[in-house]
């Protein structure tokens, strides 16, 4: 997948069988093993960070199940998208991503109303979150991992998200 603000890959792992299985990431993915990656499981909302010095994860699949993963490179010391629960593409609905010194703006074009979350790598914890000029309570911000935050809100067809941090 590609947008003006970034590129990422999607991988679906399917277990057609009646028994639990473990699967490695597909070797067809275009991943540089020297880089770190964000790995997000769309349906289970699980996050992993793949680091070059660690073993790559093995994904556990229940009988007759599917796992949809997004993989994005980790960008050190810069805000960036990690994932999104609004759309299967995990970011295809994001039309603009504009970081600044201690804030960023993100535009969403979804074409429907939905409650979901955008997952962001940020250099600091959010101190203000505004969606369509309405300030959200900071309870909408959840820490997923060190420096990774999920911000939950509703998109009404389109939305403009503005986040500030210290």
Image: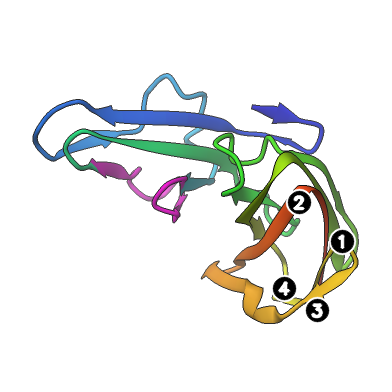
Residue 139 location in percent, x, y? 63, 80
Q: Is residue 158 left or right of residue 18?
A: right
Residue 42 location in percent, x, y? 47, 45
Q: Quadrant of residue 92?
A: top right
Seen in the picture, residue 151 relative to 106 is either above or below; the reply is: below
**Start and end of the magenta stretch?**
41-60
Q: Is residue 145 visible?
A: no
Whether pointer 3 and pointer 4 mark residues with C-beta atoms closer than 8 Å, the reply is yes
Badge nearest the viewer, 4 or 2: 2
> What residue is shown at x 19% (from left), y 42% (from top)?
62
Mark 3 lies on residue: 166
> What residue is shown at x 66% (from left), y 40% (from top)?
91
Mark 1 or 2 closer to N-term? 1
Q: Is residue 153 left or right of residue 133?
A: left
Whether pointer 4 and pointer 2 mark residues with C-beta atoms closer than 8 Å, the reply is no
Mark 1 or 4 closer to N-term? 4
How would you rate the neighbour count of disc 2 (Cα within 10 Å): few for under 14, some for 14-19, many for 20 or more? some
């Amino acid at each position: 997948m590609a947008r003006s603000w970034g590129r990422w890959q999607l991988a679906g792992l399917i277990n057609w069988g009646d028994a639990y299985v473990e699967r490695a990431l597909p070797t067809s993915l275009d991943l540089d093993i020297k880089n770190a990656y964000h790995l997000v499981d769309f349906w289970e909302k699980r996050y992993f960070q793949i680091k070059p010095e660690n073993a790559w994860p093995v994904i556990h699949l229940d009988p007759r199940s599917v796992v949809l993963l997004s993989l994005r490179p980790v960008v050190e010391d810069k805000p960036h998208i990690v994932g999104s629960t609004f759309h299967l593409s995990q970011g295809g609905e994001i039309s603009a991503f504009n970081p600044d010194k201690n804030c960023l703006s993100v535009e969403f074009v979804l074409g429907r109303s939905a409650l979901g979350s955008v997952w962001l790598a940020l250099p600091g914890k959010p101190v203000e979150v505004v969606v369509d000029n309405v300030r959200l309570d900071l309870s909408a911000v959840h820490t997923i991992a060190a420096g990774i935050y999920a911000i939950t809100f509703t998109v009404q067809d389109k939305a403009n998200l503005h986040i500030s941090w210290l």
